[in-house]
Structure formats: structure tokens, C-alpha cells
Amino acid sequence: MAEDKKDLETVVDANNDEIRHRIRALREDLDLTMQEMADATGRSVAEYAAQESGEADLTFTFIYKCANKLGVDVTELLTGESPHLKGFSLVREGEGIPIKRRAGFEYLHKAPLLSKKLAEPFVVTIPYSKEAEEEEIHLSYHKGQELDYVISGHLRFSYEGVLTDLNPGDVVMYDSGRGHGEIAIGGEPCVILAVVMEPHEEGSR
């Protein structure tokens, strides 16, 4: 699941004003400055302030990095509910926290209420686009590792510009801090299970 450097993702089925309020309240409770949050999210202070205030759209990448800096699970920022399940979490087919990117990628977070997760699992639907298939694949970067398992359709995976086509049942695992991206090919959407493993800052959750 490539995290777009240009922040193309927006959250759906969530109250953005409430999410902003949670971020601001936690930041103030922890006595963190906007500069510290801007550094943690890879933005200028002005860009961070615009997202926290509502002048700019929230993105999942932004919320995810805020959660790590604030020491909470991303679910707490999205829903206001702290993950409380211990031992195991069961999420049925089609269920989860939905997240959508402007580029058309759709995500379902598949373990939102499990506490102390070491990874974030998503079922990702990648739409087919003839234009995307003909263009150079945009490369993205996020710390840690990622595992992508192709459930249906066909995936073209780019890793630092090297292209590999994957079919149902194929798995790719990689250092996500290096340039990577993916598109659906073959005239149909591609559905993958993406497991994002990002190292957390010291002192975070």
C-alpha cells in the first residue's frame, strides 16, 4: 500500500472536524509544538497548521504520522475509540474502517480495535486505469516494511523503477523506505492484502 508523498489520500466515513480536534487536543495535552508535529509529519509548520485547522484536507498519511508522534493508535484519531481488544481481533468480510484516496484506491483497515498492533493490515482495492498503465508509476516512501498479497486481479509493482507483474496468490515484501508503487493491470481492478509495518518512535504507543 504505497503511502503517497503528495498526500493523495483523504479519509471517508469519518468526521474530519472531530479528528482535527483530537489531534489538537492531544498535541496540547502533550505540550508538543506545531514545529515538532510538522517535523514528525514531514511538513512545514504552515502546512501542518493548515491540516490541523481545516484549511487543507486531512490525509491518511498525515493522521497515521500524527498518531505515531502522539503515542496513540490511528484508530483513536479516526474514531475516538481506543483499541481495546486483547489477544485477537475478528473483522468480517467487507467490514473495517474505510479509507479512500483521491486516486481511487480504497482501503479497509482490518484490525482497528486490536490494541498494541505491531502492523497495520488493509484490504486495498486498486482501480484499473488505462492511463495509469501507460504512464510511469509514481514511487512513494514510508519507513519500515510492507507485505502485499494479491487476492484478485493483476498487479504491476515498481520498486525503484524495476517492474514486476504479480498474479493472484503472489506475495511481495519489501523495504518501504525505498521507492515503490503499484497499479492494477489487465483491464480490471486488483485487490490486495497490504500489511504495513512501520517502526514507532521511542515512547510512542
Image (cartoon, rainbow, N blue to C red):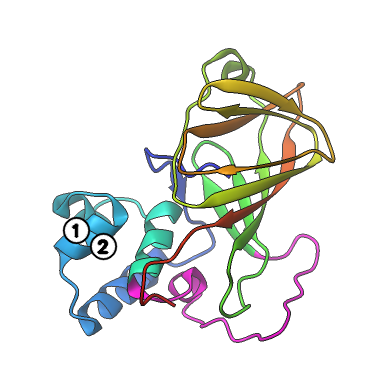
Region in magenta: 70-96
Element carrying mark 1: helix
Where does residue 21 sit, x and y in percent of width and height? 31, 74
- Tell me if 143 is positioned left or right of 29 in this view: right
Residue 199's place in the image compared with 83, above or below, is above
Where does residue 139 sit, x and y in percent of width and height? 47, 30
Residue for badge 1:
49
Question: Residue shown at 74%/42% (left/top)?
Answer: 191
Task: Report the amino acid beneath label 1.
Answer: Ala
Answer whether residue 59 is visible to the viewer in this image.
no
Residue for badge 2:
52
Residue 205's place in the image compared with 14, above or below, is below
Instruction: Tell me, yes or no, whether the highlighted magenta stretch contains residue 81.
Output: yes
Element carrying mark 2: helix
- The tally of labels here is 2
**Disc 1, disc 2: CB below 8 Å?**
yes
